Image (cartoon, grey):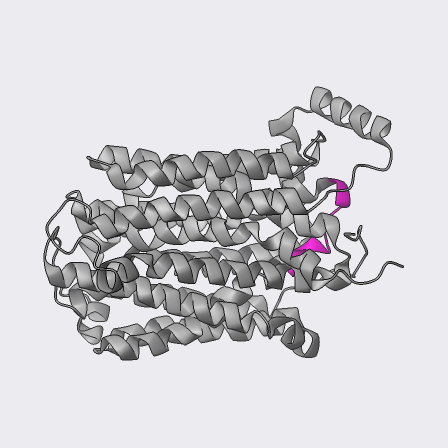
Amino acid sequence: MKSPPSLWTLYNMSFGFFGIQAGWALQMANMSAIYEYLGADAHRIPLLWLAAPLTGIIVQPIIGHMSDRTWNRLGRRRPYFLTGAILASVALVLMPNSSALWMAAGLLWVLDASINISMEPFRAFVADLLPEKDRTRGFAMQALFIGLGAVVASMLPWLLSQVFHVGGDDVGATIPRAVTLSFYIGAAMLFGSVLWTIVTTKEHPPEDMTAFRKATTERSRVLGVAREIASDVLAMPETMRRLAWVQLFTWLGLFSMWLFFGVAVARNIFGGTPGTPAYEAGIAWGGNCFAAYSAVCFVFSFALPALAKRYGRKRTHAMCLLAGAVGLVSVAFVHDKYVLLLSMLGVGVAWASTLSMPYAMVAGSLPREKTGVYMGIFNFFIVIPEIAAAVAFGPILEHVLTEQNLLVRVIGGDNRLAAVVIGGMSLAVASGLALIVKESPQRNSVCAD
């Protein structure tokens, strides 16, 4: 039996997530504000996010399917890391130069699809290279770098504007220069960190290359990619089926936060509107709040393996999601920007667990030769709630969460703040569903050198 992978091995194979999450965090913290800077009304913002998840639901399983059947000089998963990193970096550079809503929405589509091309194989990467007993550590290391990347990226606009005084004279500009420079830096972080993982981490070729290529050719010829993916969806393991419901409610809650938290803070706590100094300060502080929960994610990731060992993965995940639910609901009753950071403690705990526990639980139930495609299918249950939020939240904000709505009146805020509270309620439902997940027996995989 091979010895457990070293900390350095886990570091190298996961470091790419630092840059991937930096790009993801920049779009999550700033895209709704960019849309408002370009003139979008609140009820139009969710629809402007729609192209990205629609692309993801197509890209993720296809990339997973293709990476399962790829072997070249770069390996199996690494060719996709590189391709996605190049495309995402270009999109990040172009995004803050958008001059119209359609341009920003189109670039978000490209950015989200490109990040998915890199990110989806990273999940299979851990399952490929680590045995079952070490996967919690592997996914926790990914969560650590995700937290660190998000901290840096989320704080960039605030640091550049408030500490380094970038764009101090451009108040009222279409998109502040601090945001533009943040996207440029994020592009460099994304490409550089993914390249580090590609260079430092080797993949293992199939034991029987002739049989591998023969099986790949036969499966592609007989079923075709779409039919085989559809067949795999119908044959999902029981663990994955139950986790799917947990993921649906978890990510519905998270997307509610990402879509509306920044603009809710800018309007309800800072009292700003687009184009005013108060609004810009509120958006920047919203980025600091995202950095705060990402910092909690970073720190809490060290504790997750020990908690999972003591309480079990599903109980640990349920407790963490409940902490996130409390954190988001509490935002409605906070009126001081510094107290708002305390609400992010629970969100950070939930985020750390969401990035590791579900993947650690599902990985052990997957057939080794289909790890990539099933990780892509598992991401359906991230994309589907994003699509649901994009389609439903516009009409809900416009016609349901009006000033007369009971929830809006109880929290004493506007419909954007109410959407954040609904996100907290969704996390609470996910917490309850996590307790009924049935984990599969452990089995081993190939260990990294």
What residue is at 72 percent from the left and 44 percent from the top? 202
**Which residues are drawn in magenta?**
360-369
In the rendered image, which quarter is residue 66 located in? top right
Q: Position of residue 165 (x, y in %)?
A: 21, 59
Specify whether 374 is left or right of 382: right
Specify whether 132 is left or right of 24: right
Q: Position of residue 119 (x, y in %)?
A: 54, 45
Specify whether 25 is left or right of 284: right
In the rendered image, which quarter is residue 136 located in? bottom right
Q: Is residue 322 magenta?
A: no
Does 144 appear above or below 203? below
Q: Position of residue 346 (x, y in %)?
A: 43, 74
Question: Mostly what secondary structure, the magenta segment?
Answer: helix
What residue is at 19 percent from the left and 65 percent from the top? 405
Q: State whether residue 51 appears in this view.
A: no
Question: Which image quarter is the N terminus in?
Answer: bottom right
Q: Nearer the viewer, residue 349 or 156?
A: 156
What residue is at 61 percent from the left and 74 percent from the top? 315
Q: Nearer the viewer, residue 215 or 244?
A: 215
Farthest-out residue, top: 221
Q: Is residue 364 magenta?
A: yes
Q: Position of residue 69 (x, y in %)?
A: 70, 31
Q: Nearer the viewer, residue 65 or 138?
A: 138
Specify whether 204 is left or right of 268: right
What residue is at 21 percent from the left and 75 percent from the top? 410
Q: Nearer the viewer, residue 348 or 424?
A: 348
Does 50 appear above or below 265? above
